[in-house]
Every structure is written in structure tokens, then in C-alpha cells.
Amino acid sequence: MTNSDMRKIVIIFALCLFCASAALAQKAKYVFYFIGDGMGLNPLHTTELYLASLEGNVGIKHLPFMDFPYSTFATSYSANSDVTDSAAAGTALATGHKTKNAMLGMNADSVAVNSIAVWAKNSGKKVGVCTNVCIDDATPAAFYAHQVNRKYYHAIGEQLAASGFHYFAGSDFRKPDENGVELHALCAQNGYTWAYGYQDAVEKMKTAEKLMMVQRKDRPAHIPYSIDRTADDLTLGQIVETGIKMLTKNNKNGFFLMVEGGAIDHALHGKDARTAIDDILDFDAAIQVAIDFYKQHPNETLIVVTADHDTGGMVPGNGRYMLNLEWLQYQSCSTDAVTERLNALKKNKMKKSWDDVKQVLSECYGLFTKVKVNWREEYELREAYEAAFEGNASEENLYSKNSALAAKARDILNRAVGISWASRSHSGSYVPVFAIGVGANQFHGRLNNTDLPLITAKIAGYRR
């Protein structure tokens, strides 16, 4: 072999090594997978319009993640319906398989299929699954459970305990005790350390191998809406921050972290615009925690943000060529919290006059004092007041049962600011997709929701 031939071989070998190293460098070591439950395009756009209106401007004030360099949209239909539920949509986003509404972690033939979280774990990554609603709710459950019905909450909890994932966070189990099996104890037996609140988690994660973080014991078991939250309640940002610390501890292999903004969907089911906006902003703040991490590891991190479906058919506009979204700033609590205040007033037989009710509506929605109420609207409120206080009239959605008076006041505020709604349920609309980081350019063109986990797994090099 001549020297010239030897040089050619060396050059070819060096090129192969370079290509191989370049290919490895393109794999995402750290993956954030954000799902805003019910967060269609219109709720996002309305949030940006609202933020601009607070500054007296027409147009939008940008949410940072909506300016990610790659953005597109995806379909959300399920295997048996053009309008998906959260279980089927969560399964599609988790596993790459369409399934029937209500089914979790199974294909349409009821065969269990693994999620991207399992692929990540099997590829040597640490895995976290978190939310600000119940940890056994449909979207998070799609990443670790296999059930024919999303309402089998205790069975879902048992599969969580057996998952071996390193980090869970959110509101506590819906059904922790059934048939003699207590889920908190079962998780502890399987190596999970329970942390109650952010500060408790900061201490316990120092020694914990696997962590479960829920609300402080002196707070409501379910994390409140952002608009109702106190300083003692968990935020989604704290949940993400804890997840990063937990998943990077003693770990050189990288992680996969799924984060659901589940309360967005709950608020949209209740046609509660300001409450939904506040939870979108809480979701945005959690994404910002991931963005800050990305800035420290720009060549190793991928952030994907999407939604499982649209909820409510929310539209900024109700026939007039104007919006008054800035009036939403006068709403001080969720419609659920207004119902609680009205129910407390109703129980106090010495204090339930119409003037007392007007004061509650003013303090909670800004009606009468900040937002003008005409005579016809006041008549509607008086009718709702009598129906709610004398006949227990109410309005029910998937997640709450509200006083008819609170619901009517909410509707009047929606009408005043210019927001209209298609329903109190899901729609078949497209959902947004945003991406930044390693391989983010692969999210382009019209996508199916089943494409997202497959593209993400390919970028991260997970073994399926």
C-alpha cells in the first residue's frame, strides 16, 4: 500500500469519525415536553391581546415561547371521533398511537403501547412526569399507565407506583385508597420519597432517589387555579425547577421531563377567561424555567410546547369590532371561588340581600363598579340570584359545579370584554406546536399529534 493510499484511508476514517461525532452531537440530551391542556390557538392569542390591552395598546404582547424559531400546528382527532378527549389526545402525544376516547396508553385495539417516557427510561435517561392537576389525570397518566378507561384512577395510581420514573409532581391522587391498597404507602414501598410542598422537596431531594411532590399538608390537596393561589401553594414553575434539579442530580445521561398545564383546560371548561389566561401565564413562567436551562445547555436541549386539544371554542370577538379585554383585570378570583363566596353568603341567613350579593360580584368580577352593568343585565343577575338562593340553581361542567349566579356574572363579564364561546367542552380545532433547541427544525409542515413523540424520540435517540 502506497503512502498516498494510506493518506486516503486516514482521511476517510477521520471523516467517518467526524460524521459520527456530529450525529451524536445532534441528539438532545435534555428534553422538555410541555402540554398545555385545552390550550388552543385562540386562548393563546387572547392572552397576548389581554397583556397588550393592560398597557393601553392595540395588538399583542408576546409570550416568549410563541416566538420559538420553529412553530406549526397539529391535528387532534382521536381514533373514533373528530373531537378528542384528553385520554386519547394524551395517548397520541405520549405514544404516537391514535386511540379511542377515554382510553389511556393503549392503541385502538386495546393493546398496551409504551410512551416516549418509557422509551427515554429504557435509553438510560431519568424521567419526570408532572402537572398542576391530579397526577392520575388523563394527560400525565398517558405517559405511564395502560387502561381502557381514564376513570380507573386507583389502577392508574398503581401503575404510577410501578413505573420506576424518577420524578412526579402535581395534585395528589384522586382515589388513594381502594381494596386495601393505599397508594401513598405503595409508592413509598417502591422507593418514592413524598415531599409536601416546594421547601420540603428542596430538602428531601438531596437524598431521594425518586421523588413525589404534592401540595403542603396544610393546603388544599388540589393545587388551586393560579388566580386563587397563595404563596404557600405550588406553582408550575416550582414544579419544573424541582424536576430539573432532581433529574440532573448524579446524572450524566440526560433526562425527559413532561410538564402539563392542566388547569388551563379546567378553566376553559368553565368558560372562565381570566382564570384560563392566568394559568396560561403560569404555564409560560414554567416554560421560562426550561428556557433558562436551555440557555445554559443550548447544544444539548430540546423544548417542545404543544396542546392536546382546544377547549371551549374561545373566540376574542362577539360581533362588535372592538374588545375590552383590559376589564378582565378586575376579576380577582375564579368562578369556582365566586361560587364558594356566594354559598357562604347564602348560609348566613342574616346577610344575603341583593346589595350584599352585588358587593361580592363587584369584588370578584368588577361588575357595577369597574365594569358597567345595564338594566337588562342587572335584571338577568337578579333572576339568577333568586334561582340560586331560593332554588339552588347551578351550572355544571366537567370539573366543577357553579352557582347559576356566578355563571351569569361570568357570562356578563365575557360579553362586556368581547369574548365568546362555542361550548363548555372540547373542539376539533388544530393545536399549536412550538420548538427550540437541538433538532427543533424537524417540527415543520402540518403535523398529526402522533408525529410529535416520534419526532422528539428520534431527535433524542431514544430506543423504542
Image (cartoon, rainbow, N blue to C red):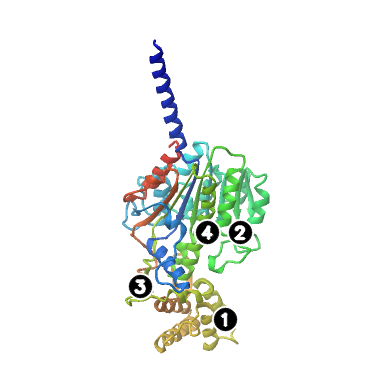
Disc 2 and disc 3: Cα gap in Å? 37 Å
SS at badge 1: helix
SS at badge 4: helix
Residue at the extreme top: 1
Three-letter residue code for mark 1: Leu
Q: Quadrant of residue 230?
A: bottom right
Disc 1 and disc 4: Cα gap in Å? 35 Å
User: Where is residue 185 drawn, in percent x and y?
Assistant: 62, 49
Q: Nearer the viewer, mark 3 or mark 1?
A: 3
SS at badge 3: loop
Q: Nearer the viewer, mark 2 or mark 4?
A: 4
Residue at 60% across, 64% down = 220
Q: How many labels does the image show?
A: 4
Three-letter residue code for mark 4: Ala
Residue at 47% across, 83% down = 385
The earlier-in-sequence mark between 2 and 3 is 2
Is 197 positioned to the left or the right of 73 in the image? right
Above or below, comparing residue 99 to residue 222 in the picture: above
Cβ–Cβ under 8 Å for marks 3 and 4? no
User: Where is residue 402 drawn, in percent x and y?
Assistant: 48, 73
The earlier-in-sequence mark between 2 and 4 is 2
Q: Which of marks 2 and 3 is in front?
A: 3
Residue at 53% across, 56% down = 286
The earlier-in-sequence mark between 3 and 1 is 3
The earlier-in-sequence mark between 1 and 4 is 4
Q: Quadrant of the N terminus?
A: top left
Binning the other alpha carbons within 10 Å of mark 3 as few (below 14), some (14 to 19) or many (20 upward) gives: some
Residue at the extreme front: 4
